[in-house]
Image: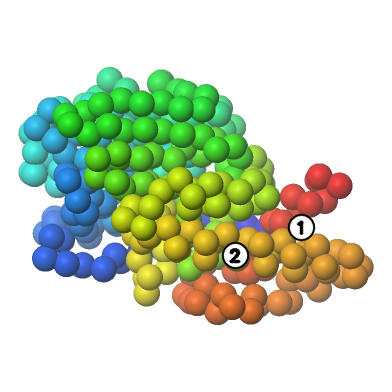
Amino acid sequence: MLSRRDFLRLTGAVAASTPFLSASSWREAASGGTFTELRRGVGIYTERGGTIGWLLTDDGGVVVDTQSPRTAPNCRRGLRERSDAALAFVVNTHHHADHTGGNGVFAPHTERIVAHEAAPALQRQAYGSSDDAPEQVYAGTTFSEEWTETVGDETIRLRHHGPAHTGGDAVLFFERANVVHGGDLIFNRAYPFIDVEGGANTANWIATLETLHETYDDDTQFIFGHGNPEFGVTGDRADLLVMRDFFVSLREYVTQQRQAGASLSEMKQKTTLEGFEAFNFDWFLSLGDCVEAVHTEMEASG
């Protein structure tokens, strides 16, 4: 099973995805990153690691996830070129270093980094004593179930739906823009990292995706943590059900194989789940990694 350290090492070397570019996209000459505007001052930044979301208003800005110490300065510089408004706060959708590694770049410019209450402890557990991890900066403002703040005329809502990708996932909603940043709850048509050590729960992950699909509407635009370059890192609520259906099929496959007495090695020989062929592209996670994670999860739960 792919470890967190291996996952984060690889996400540091692989771009999250190249989003579909439009007239509202621009490229910073000094960096390899891309800024893409979505709507009402909300946009994304992609370079290496998890997709960064941002909001710029005359009254302040918001950054959602921070990638790494190497890429975060490129993002901050590009945002400052677009607006000189103060940074109201930074949000971490979860604790993984490709989403929190750049916290130290933004921390001197804001008084608050916000995350679910479980995220700082999970971050300390994962990287606090690691020699090869960047210096850690942790969220100082946390919440249990919901958190709300207003910046300019935009209302930002955070909600935790229980353990899914990790034990400390936060879903962010830009209410007036009708844009959701779901962090790594969505790997868009890509095999996901299931962080069993970090509290992942694929059964509740399924339930969370269904809840999000029911909560938002067909006009809601979603930002995903990672994605197949063919499909990008933004989409709509229908993409949530693709991820949901993948997990349903994955869990059914592992359950059937366990009941049949197959070994983990035999289970991992399967390379594609029927109906999810698009997940097979040049990506460092495999179906076998997902099978092993779910197998480990099921073994632990009995």
The amino acid sitting under disc 2 is Asp
Q: Nearer the viewer, residue 251 or 177?
A: 177
Asked whether the viewer can see residue 165, the reply is: no
Asked whether the viewer can see residue 261, the reply is: yes
Q: Which quadrant of the figure has residue 252?
A: bottom right
Quadrant of the image containing the N terminus: bottom right
Numbered badge on residue 295:
1
Q: Position of residue 96 (x, y in %)?
A: 49, 43
Determine whether, in the image, residue 1 is placed left or right of residue 298.
left
Please tell me which residue is depicted at 63% across the width and 69% down the height of the picture.
287
Give whichever of discs 2 and 1 has the lower sequence position: 2
Location of residue 77 with respect to 296 vertically, above or below: above
Q: Position of residue 4 (x, y in %)?
A: 58, 49
Location of residue 168 with respect to 17 vertically, above or below: above
Please tell me which residue is depicted at 22% across the width and 34% down the height of the picture.
154
Please tell me which residue is depicted at 53% across the width and 47% down the height of the picture.
211
Q: Position of residue 280 (x, y in %)?
A: 53, 76
Secondary element type, mark 1? helix
Separation (CA) of disc 2 from disc 1: 18 Å
Within 10 angstroms of label 2, few (less than 14), some, or many (20 or more) residues?
A: some
Please tell me which residue is depicted at 62% across the width and 57% down the height of the picture.
2
Numbered badge on residue 245:
2
Q: Which quadrant of the figure has residue 54?
A: top left
Secondary element type, mark 2? helix
